[in-house]
């Protein structure tokens, strides 16, 4: 979708004082949404609990904490046999009710996989940031605390939806630490960046490596609900790993390394490998890696549509990143979802609408343009670039996208 047409993207930029995504990961920042009413539209505690109780969830996707200690799954999950005596683990409503009443933190990772509103919001953030994004939900009751002080290997944007939560944010101990790193980075920084309370509508950006902890000590609110959007940005290590994969295309790099032989033979091998590695580095700069990654990222999940091959009535683009459109001579080429699709240039305007990320009424666009838009929309659906819109998926856009659906 146009990058700032989603109210969450607009709100984050306004709250943090950003004009675009470039400050992401650079420094701590905090602010408040101009319109806090979108908090309830995004997610509520009752909707989150409804999601939990209607699915079979397992750790680590669903976890429960009490005063910083992670509880055993048997404390909040139960095995429920079906009529064939096959056991499925589900949330134990009575146990969860008791835990929440005494004070606990429920954590649900990848909320976007269960909720259409979160899916659309996450996709908007991915198109905005050019990075993959995951959203986790944290529901805390009473004065319980969640994780102990820790750092994340990705940048996060925290949005407080309900209640209050007190935060202790500190600077990094090691610059830009990684999940797989040369240093365990276990010494907590003593440099305080911010300590305070987040209220509904407050937004906070915590860069990778900054130590932080959230607590509920002394809070009078019965519960707190916040979302954490994690942005895993690409690094030079990722670029080098991509280059290593590209090296498999070159016969020289697939050959066995010399273990024996003369000094001259081993030196000759080293020179050949070094020269080929330099050529590969120069031919494949970091920008090529980033562009290739967005082009080749597999299509996002989408609900099956039946019957297959049916002409779509309404569609939406569901690629993880905004499609890349190239114009040349009389054709337009689209790179998206690992696919390369070419259409005639006269369909470019309609194609741009279909790939906008907003819901599209195919029949209305077909009649307005005078082109065979239904066939084009069907092709994009078959390629996994677009998906049929259902009432359920359409609900994820309602009240959160500023442009009117076509």
Image: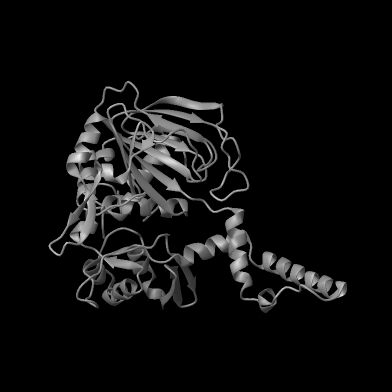
Q: Residue at x 60, y 40 (%)?
A: 175
Q: Residue at x 35, y 23 (%)?
A: 217
Tell me: residue 174, above or below residue 276: above
- Which of 327/169 is in front? 169
The image's colouring method is one colour
Tell me: residue 305, above or below residue 69: below
- Tell me the quarter of the image containing the C terminus: bottom left
**Farthest front residue?**
85
Across and down, in percent, residue 167 comes to 42, 29
**Farthest left residue?**
83
- Which of 255/377 is in front? 255
* Number of numbered callouts drawn: 0
- Which of 90/349 is in front? 90
Q: Is residue 35 visible?
A: no
Q: Is residue 377 visible?
A: yes
- Tell me the quarter of the image containing the N terminus: bottom left
Q: Is residue 364 left or right of residue 248?
A: left
């Amino acid at each position: 979708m146009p990058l700032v047409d989603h109210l969450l993207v607009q709100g984050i930029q306004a709250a943090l004082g950003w004009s675009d995504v470039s400050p992401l990961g650079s420094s701590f920042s905090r602010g408040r949404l101009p319109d806090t009413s979108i908090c309830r539209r995004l997610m509520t505690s009752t909707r989150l609990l409804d999601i939990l109780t209607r699915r079979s969830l397992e750790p680590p996707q669903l976890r429960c904490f009490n005063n910083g200690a992670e509880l055993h799954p048997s404390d909040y999950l139960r095995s429920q046999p079906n009529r064939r005596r096959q056991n499925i683990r589900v949330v134990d409503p009575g146990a969860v009710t008791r835990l929440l009443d005494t004070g606990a933190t429920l954590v649900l990772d990848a909320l976007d996989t269960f909720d259409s509103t979160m899916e659309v919001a996450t996709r908007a953030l991915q198109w905005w940031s050019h990075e993959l994004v995951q959203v986790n939900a944290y529901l805390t009751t009473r004065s319980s605390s969640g994780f102990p002080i820790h750092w994340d290997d990705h940048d996060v944007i925290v949005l407080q939806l309900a209640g209050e939560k007190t935060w202790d944010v500190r600077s990094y101990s090691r610059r830009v630490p990684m999940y797989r790193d040369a240093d365990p980075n276990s010494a907590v920084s003593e440099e305080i960046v911010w300590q305070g309370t987040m209220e509904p509508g407050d937004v906070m950006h915590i860069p990778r490596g900054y130590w932080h902890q959230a607590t509920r000590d002394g809070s009078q609110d019965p519960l707190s609900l916040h979302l954490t959007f994690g942005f895993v940005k690409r690094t030079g290590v990722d670029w080098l790993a991509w280059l290593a994969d590209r090296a498999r295309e070159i016969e020289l790099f697939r050959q066995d390394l010399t273990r024996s032989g003369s000094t001259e033979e081993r030196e000759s091998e080293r020179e050949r490998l070094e020269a080929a590695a330099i050529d590969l580095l120069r031919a494949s700069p970091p920008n090529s890696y980033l562009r290739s990654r967005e082009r080749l990222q597999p299509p996002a999940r989408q609900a099956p549509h039946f019957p297959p091959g049916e002409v779509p009535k309404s569609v939406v683009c569901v690629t993880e990143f905004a499609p890349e459109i190239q114009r040349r001579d009389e054709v337009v080429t689209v790179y998206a979802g690992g696919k390369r699709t070419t259409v005639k240039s006269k369909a470019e305007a309609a194609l741009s609408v279909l790939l906008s990320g907003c819901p599209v009424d195919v029949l209305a666009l077909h009649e307005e343009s005078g082109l065979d838009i239904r066939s084009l929309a069907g092709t994009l659906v078959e390629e996994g670039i677009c998906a049929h819109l259902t009432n359920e998926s359409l609900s994820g856009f309602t009240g959160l996208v500023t442009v009117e659906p076509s």
